Image (cartoon, helix red, strand yellow):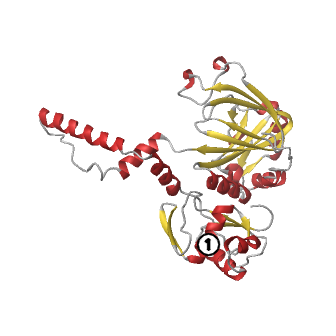
Amino acid sequence: MRTSNRDAFRALVPWSHFNALLESDRLFDDRTRVVRRGRDLPREMWSQIGPDFKRVAFTDQLQRFCQEGLSLSLGQIHHDVPAIAGLVTMLEHALPARVQTNLYASFGRESAFRAHYDPHDVLVLHLHGRKRWSCFGPRPDSCADTTLVGDEHLGPVVWEAVLEPGDILYLPRGEVHRATVEGDAAMHLTNALSWPRESDLFKWLAAEGSTAINADADVPVYGSEEDLTRYEADLRARLHRLADTLDLRAFIESSTQRRRVRLPFNLGLSTELAPDCWVQPLLPAGVQLPAEGTARVGFNGGTVSLDAEERAVMAALLGAGARQIVELSDLCGLDMPTVRDCIARLARRSLVRLSEGGAP
């Protein structure tokens, strides 16, 4: 998708912010990869242990590698960049999926990762530079035991385009792809979208349906052949009853409500609530709140209680999405002092994410 807005995502990670991350210990984090021509470079090739027993990067060596072709992958970047944490909150609020965001900065055509597929859907947001993406269709059966796809297994290119700042690319689970830099450098984010799977459904059935079919009985491991035959027949009948009563909507709702989110601290922000402060709801979008009065809802594996005023503010946020505090009074029908007090209480309980000024 071409947004025609080259600045759509640039502010998420400016190049200066990326370089600041590399100057921190994030460069030596286990979630960071330094890749050249499809292979991870050992740390010993671009860093050493300093006099204080801390690892220090050879900046000149990294610069040289970048000129020759290098990619840096920062996994789970939403744990390090507040703006991307807000992006993940928005995506998980809108989609019944778990989201994890990685950052890829690539330098030169030789920086390309090898052709591969991902075991989840991917939503790519292009930030800087230009990058050519080539897609080869679904994963071949011969590569079922690895996510890498060798050239000998690649079919013809079925789709190809150059992504520029502001562009969005969706890659279905299992789509084989490869990307190469057009020019000197490029940066993009990949949002891994993990939807509920059948394995999750079976676990949910085991947990939620066990009482319905009395699944706590002992398996007759020392029974006679007749005992085992009788047990198998009875178990099959009970499992058939469980399958016949399967409620997929209940499973999806349960998956959404049980999904764990990374809770923000909001320290300091909840005491200095400026009118332009953005507020993002962390409750799932599908949560049903009563039209009035108090509410108890499932959240992050537990249950939270909302008083009448908190419920009104949360309902407005769930309906409208992230909003600045100055907008909330009209949306929820409460005066501004009450809105600010409610937001402060919700923030201290990590039920909303606060972002100072600008977009969340």
Left of 192 or right of it: where is 276?
right
Residue shown at the point (60%, 35%) measured from the top left: 173
Residue to which mark 1 is pinned = 312
Q: Quadrant of residue 318?
A: bottom right
Q: Quadrant of the N terminus?
A: top right
Q: Is residue 199 left or right of residue 333?
A: left
Q: Is residue 53 visible?
A: no
Residue ID at (54%, 62%): 288
Residue that extends furthest to the bottom in the rendered view of this protein? 337
Q: What element does badge 1 sit on?
A: helix
Query: Foreground: 46 or 214?
Result: 214
Q: Is residue 14 above or below residue 338?
A: above
Crowdedness near tag 1: few (<14), some (14–19) or many (≥20) residues, C-alpha within 10 Å = many
Specify the amino acid type for callout 1: Ala
Tell me which residue sits at (31%, 50%) in the image. Answer: 210
When asked about the image quadrant of residue 307, the answer is: bottom right
Q: Is residue 312 left or right of residue 251?
A: right
Note whether 330 is above or below 67 in the view shown: below
Q: Position of residue 162 (x, y in %)?
A: 82, 33
Q: Position of residue 154 (x, y in %)?
A: 66, 20
Task: Please provide percent x and percent y for residue 308.
Answer: 56, 77
Residue 269 seen from this side: yes
Q: Residue at x 64, y 53 (%)?
A: 94
In depth, the one of 105 and 5 nearer the eye is 5
Look at the picture and state if 174 lies above or below 21. above
